[in-house]
Image (tube, helix red, strand yellow):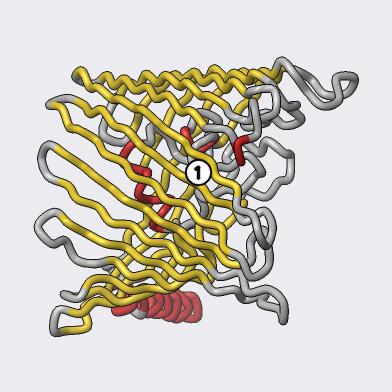
Amino acid sequence: MQNKSQALRKLAVALTAAIAIPLPALADTANITFYGKINVDVESVKSDKVTTPVTTATSINRVQSNVSRFGFKGSEDLGDGLQAIFQFEAQIDSVNDKNANTPYTGIRNSQIGLKGSFGTVFGGAWDSPYKAVHNKTELFDNGSVFTATQLVGKSGNGKNFNTRQNNAIQYWSPDFKGFSFKGSYGLDSAKTAADNKTALSLSGAYENDMLHAGLGYERRLDQTTRTKHDSAIRLLGAYKLPDGQVGVMLERLSIADTITTTANQNNIELSATYKLGKKNLGAFLVKNGNYNNVTNSGARQLTLRYGYSYSKRSELYAAYTSISNDTAANYGFYAGSAAGSSQTALGLGIIHSF
């Protein structure tokens, strides 16, 4: 009996020590925030033209995980108004659509840096300023079939300027009476004697109670043709209403097809949002112009969205999108689609943020 009592006392002491030891460590990490978003919808997608009609279906019903993610972020006060900041964010497949049994599907915005009166500077993998400046008029996360980035920021030869820059150093300015600036320089960790695929991305914005205006520019070396640059510039503005906004974006993409020739393309987007209590409505229309003046190489996209917010963190939504390609174009979200296709998607989904 005495041996049992001694054993119980030893166990109690051990448990007390195990509980007590981590307390200082927990106090040190109390500034960490764990967060995430789950966005899943049931959708029906169609394409009237596919490259291999015998083996490729022209319609699919599926459940999609639309860039669902989780992460943690935090900061530490270093004194004199200086903070150390950090964030790690991972993308997950919450529906296991590909039967891969691997919920983790990639790195999203992740960084470590410093923040102070001078602004914010960090290194890591992060959305380029050119991509992020468009978010003010985007109705969806950039990864769903309904997003405007199916066309916006994309050229007729397949170049995509809606990217997260890896191996990047970014600087964000403080807010100067509504004005702000962001800059990013992406390094090439796979540089060779012939290629150095660096990327410079810049954006500036102005915002007040009635207006948001943004300007983005990006320049990429050795992307299409060695020693030459691809570039993109976009200008956007949104006029704020009491319960919504209307916006417009103009964009010009320039791709160095060869040493001596550059292909140009002009894109335009119109968007609108409106809130009515817990209900919210949104729509946008995008038109991509001909690539390098090639006849019938443009496309159009129309998207409609309805959302109902049950709380600040949970929303039920329905969405419809339609992409119409000209005969020489093949934009869109449908795997196996052919040039000149018309693609549609109709979905019902739910978003929960935590």
Quadrant in which residue 275 is drawn: top left
Residue 315 picture quarter: top left
Residue drawn at (71%, 46%), measured in percent from left and top?
101
Residue 333 visible in this rendered orientation of the protein: no
- Judge whether 212 appears above or below 287 on screen: below
Residue 261 in sight from this viewpoint: yes
Q: How many marks?
A: 1
Camera-side residue of 281 and 18? 281
Q: Position of residue 349 (x, y in %)?
A: 47, 24
Residue at 9% over, 57% down: 177
> Is residue 99 positioned above or below 125 on the image?
above
- In the image, 110: left or right of 62? left
Residue 120, image x, y percentages: 28, 71
Instruction: Residue under label 1, please give it.
Output: 153
Judged from this view, the residue extending furthest toward the front is 260
Q: What's the amino acid at mark 1?
A: Gly
In the picture, the quarter occupied by the C terminus is top left
Q: Where residue 288 appears, x then y in whole percent?
A: 52, 32
> Foreground: 37 or 322?
322
- Pick out the residue farthest to the right: 54
Percent x, y of residue 319: 46, 20
- 209 displayed left or right of 129: left
Residue at (88, 23) in percent of width and height? 55
Q: Nearer the viewer, residue 7 or 137?
A: 137
Which residue lies at the image location 67% right of the left edge and 58% below the top edge? 224
Number of residues whose C-alpha sits closer than 10 Å to that of mark 1, classed few (under 14), some (14–19) or many (20 or more): many
**270 relative position to 6: left or right:** left
Q: Tag 1, which secondary structure?
A: loop
Which of 46/21 is in front? 46
